[in-house]
Every structure is written in structure tokens, then in C-alpha cells.
Image (spheres, rainbow, N blue to C red):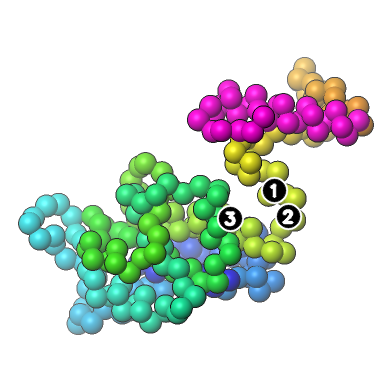
Amino acid sequence: MKIDILTLFPNMFTGILEESIIKRAVEKQAVTIELHNFRDYSTDLHHKVDDTPYGGGAGMVLMCQPIFDCVNALRTPDSTVILLTPSGKTYNQQQALSLRSKKHLILICGHYEGFDERIRTLCDVELSIGDYILTGGEIPAMVLVDSIVRLLPGVIKEESYQQESFSDGKLDYPTYTKPSIYQGLAVPEVLLSGDHQKIAQWRKQAALEKTKEIRPDLQGDD
């Protein structure tokens, strides 16, 4: 997979791209990630990328030209162009699973007050990571990169994400480690029994109960 990220603040990505699983995925050549400052594509003498909105209003709006030219320079028949915007469809694990099969993702990070509405014509998908406003699309882009890259073949063990929260419409079951008793809090005895069938049954029931208590909006399978 190749991921191109359009941003005015490429230095924001330094930490996430140089640590942990994403770094290992790049080293394994499971993914190539490139950052593009679309200010470099501005034809303005001062590399301007924003202007005041028609009709008046607060803030500055991202202009079409730099983003159009940057996307068109990167786009291929295999590309999926994603706009990170609060008005997009709310991102979830099923979308991450779908996007991992794409060969090329182009992520557009908005900023300032917003972007010229015509930029939407470039995009195949508009995504939001939640119903709140951030300074820009950089953090949502990081969320997408992290959630997708970890699902690529060979990056982590497949069983690790097959049994995670949201993988089957419910939260993950509770997990414990040593010691078996800590400050009077004990690990459920079934997990110490060695009976794998009973453990599997307990985990399934515990996941359902956890989902019902914490996230009743999710539709877990009985």
C-alpha cells in the first residue's frame, strides 16, 4: 500500500511515522507513506493557500488550486482520495478493514475555517473521526493511518485484530495478567482453570455483558 498525505504541517507526523507498528510496517515494506505540503503547489508568489470566504464570515478558506494540483500530480487509477472533514461519514473499524485492501490512499487534511466546496469533487470518500471540531485534519489522518496500517498483511498477527473490539460488532472481552490477586481484586477463576472451552464461553459472555453495559448502541452477536 501507498499512502500520500496532503498537509500544511508535515512535521506533525514525525512521531507517529517513526515509532512503533507504523515504523515497523514501513521497514517491512508493507506500506509507503509520503507527506506533501500542498503549499508547495501554490502558484501564488507568496505560496498562499487560503483566502476570505465569498459572502463574508470569520476565518480563512482553503483554495482549490494548490489542492487540485497536488492531488492531480499524485493520483493514479488505483487511488482512493479521502477528505478528512467533520461533515464526513463517521469512521469505524469496518471502514478500516475495507480501506486496507486499497492500493493507494490520498488523505487531504483540511485546516483553517474550512475548504472551498469544490475540493469535494476530487474526493472518493469523506470521513470524520467524530462529532467535534479539531484545528485541522492532521490528527484524523493519523488515526486513519494507524488503524489501517496495523491491518496490513504481516504487520501484526491476524488473530490479534480478529478478536479485538468492534471486530464482530461488540467490545473485546476483559483481559487479565499476573498477579492473580492485586489489592484484593481477583482474576476470574475460570481463566485460571486451564479449561479452554469454558474460557471461550466465559469470554464470549463477558464481551456481550461489557458491550451491553458500556456501549449498548453496538449490536453484538449472541
Mark 1–mark 3 distance (CA, rounded to whole Å): 11 Å
| Label 1: how many Cα within 10 Å (few below 14, some 14–19, many 20+) | few
* Amino acid carrying mark 3 in the image: Leu
Kindly identify which residue carries mark 3: 97
Q: What element carries label 2?
A: helix
Q: Is the magenta stretch mostly helix, strand or loop?
A: helix
The part of the image, by quadrant, that contains residue 42 is bottom left
Mark 1 and mark 3 residues within 8 Å of each other at the beta carbon: no
Above or below for 166 versus 186: below
**Where is residue 44 shown, x and y percent of the image?**
20, 80
**Where is residue 6 shown, x and y percent of the image?**
39, 69
Q: What element carries label 1?
A: helix
Please report the residue visible at 11 percent of the width from the left and 52 percent of the height from the top.
57
**Where is residue 204 shown, x and y percent of the image?**
73, 31
Figure quadrant of the N terminus: bottom right
**Left of 124 or right of it: where is 193?**
right
> Residue 69 shows which numbered tag?
none
Q: Which of marks 2 and 3 is nearer the N terminus?
A: 3
Please report the residue visible at 48 percent of the width from the left and 68 percent of the height from the top.
105
**Left of 218 or right of it: where is 106?**
left
Part of the protein shown in magenta? 195-222
Kindly identify which residue carries mark 1: 162
Above or below for 1 versus 45: above
Q: Let me know if residue 32 is in the magenta part.
A: no
Mark 2–mark 1 distance (CA, rounded to whole Å): 6 Å
* Amino acid carrying mark 2 in the image: Glu
* Amino acid carrying mark 1 in the image: Gln
Kindly identify which residue carries mark 2: 158
Please report the residue visible at 64 percent of the width from the left and 63 percent of the height from the top.
152
**Left of 125 or right of it: where is 16?**
right
Q: Which of marks 1 and 3 is nearer the N terminus?
A: 3
